[in-house]
Amino acid sequence: MTAVQVWRELSEVPDDALAASRSVVTIGNFDGMHLGHQHVVQRAREVAGEVDVATVVAVTFDPHPIAVLRPEHAPPTLTTIDERLRLLGEAGVDAVLVVPFSREIAAWTPQEFIDRILVASLHAKAVVVGANFRFGNRAAGDVHTLGDAGRTQDFSVEAVELDGGPQVWSSTYVRTCLAAGDVAGAAEALGRPFVTRGAVIKGDQRGRELGFPTANVPVVAGAAAPADGVYAGWMRRLDGADGGTMHPVAISVGTNPTFDGQRDRRVEAYVLDRTDLDLYGVEVEVVFVDRIRGMVRFDGIDALLVAIADDVERTREILGA
């Protein structure tokens, strides 16, 4: 698959090329790139074939608009901007315009947004968005606004109905699942398991002392993570050193309440039956499959060891490892 083109400013968009060939545009935050997002992109790809346009462009925003307008209410992010770009490319877009969101852009009227981005920069021949799409100052614009503009500015508009069953798929729904520890529910909405990535740090090495050494990855401030508890999942190195092998892991998320002193939340992954791995400083990906239990403060080491052994066996059963 060809790498997706990325434009991080309007000035980077190849205006002449798009003016000649036009584009099909889809717009959204696309945080998490859940199945609802993927279906919108798939429909944009289909529309491109119907109107004989080669280029599908996704317009997204960084940072999240709420992080600029009401930072105290900013939702935890499901994906970094780089992960979002990769997932958009895998879903089928050819290029992504990352709008550097600011209060100035937030003040644009819906018509200014249409004129500057859809018409002058991307030369849209068609626009495909979710049915609940809103844009412009105070979210005054919607799909009807787009449709009215399109009739006079030479682009068609299609609104894709929200889907997902009784609970429609949305980034908010995925965050709600994660906050409840329901990683299986999050995976159903995402169309893939929830993952967290990061460099392995040196922890307190208590797991090593207990016979269950863990790879510790900090939970990044502002990033979504499953609720504190124990999970079954997989882990792989991202440096390619072992060919991308997926290792079965029992995962703990939290602050280790049995031991005093740790305050930062971590994702701690124990690779089943392995005590020989040296992963300090290595970038890893931890994949969450299912929840085993909530986080518990144990009265002593013996009770903790019994619980860990049970967690490991339940991980084997869940993963078939």
Image (cartoon, grey):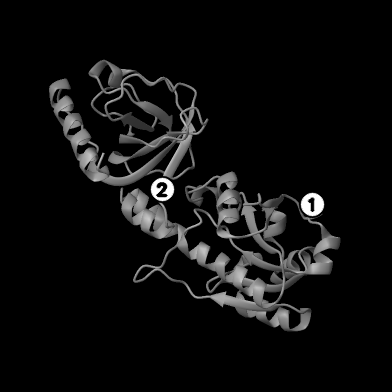
Q: Quadrant of the C terminus?
A: top left
Percent of width and height locating residue 31: 52, 54
View extreme (top): residue: 209
| Residue in the foreground of this view, choosing between 276 and 111 | 276
Q: Is residue 173 left or right of residue 149?
A: left
Per the model, the C-alpha gap separating discs 1 and 2 is: 32 Å
Percent of width and height locating residue 244: 46, 35
Q: Is residue 310 left or right of residue 214?
A: left
Residue underneath mark 2: 194
Do tag 1 and tag 2 residues touch (Cβ < 8 Å)? no
Mark 2: give few (<14), some (14-19) or many (20+) Cα within 10 Å: many
Of the residues under marks 1 and 2, which one precedes in the sequence? Answer: 1
Identity, as a three-letter code, of the amino acid under mark 2:
Phe
Q: Kindly identify the residue that appears in the image at 17 percent across and 21 percent down.
A: 301
Does the rendering let one see residue 61?
yes
Which secondary structure lies at badge 1?
helix
Q: Is residue 72 above or below residue 93?
A: above
Q: Is residue 143 above or below residue 68?
A: below
Q: Kindly identify the residue that appears in the image at 62 percent across and 80 percent down.
A: 144
State which quadrant residue 66 falls in. bottom right
View extreme (right): residue: 16
Which secondary structure lies at badge 2?
loop
Identity, as a three-letter code, of the amino acid under mark 1:
Glu
Q: Kindly identify the residue that appears in the image at 42 percent across and 35 percent down.
A: 245
| Residue in the foreground of this view, choosing between 235 and 126 | 235
Q: How many marks?
A: 2
Residue underneath mark 1: 12
| Residue in the foreground of this view, choosing between 118 and 275 | 275
Percent of width and height locating residue 266: 38, 32
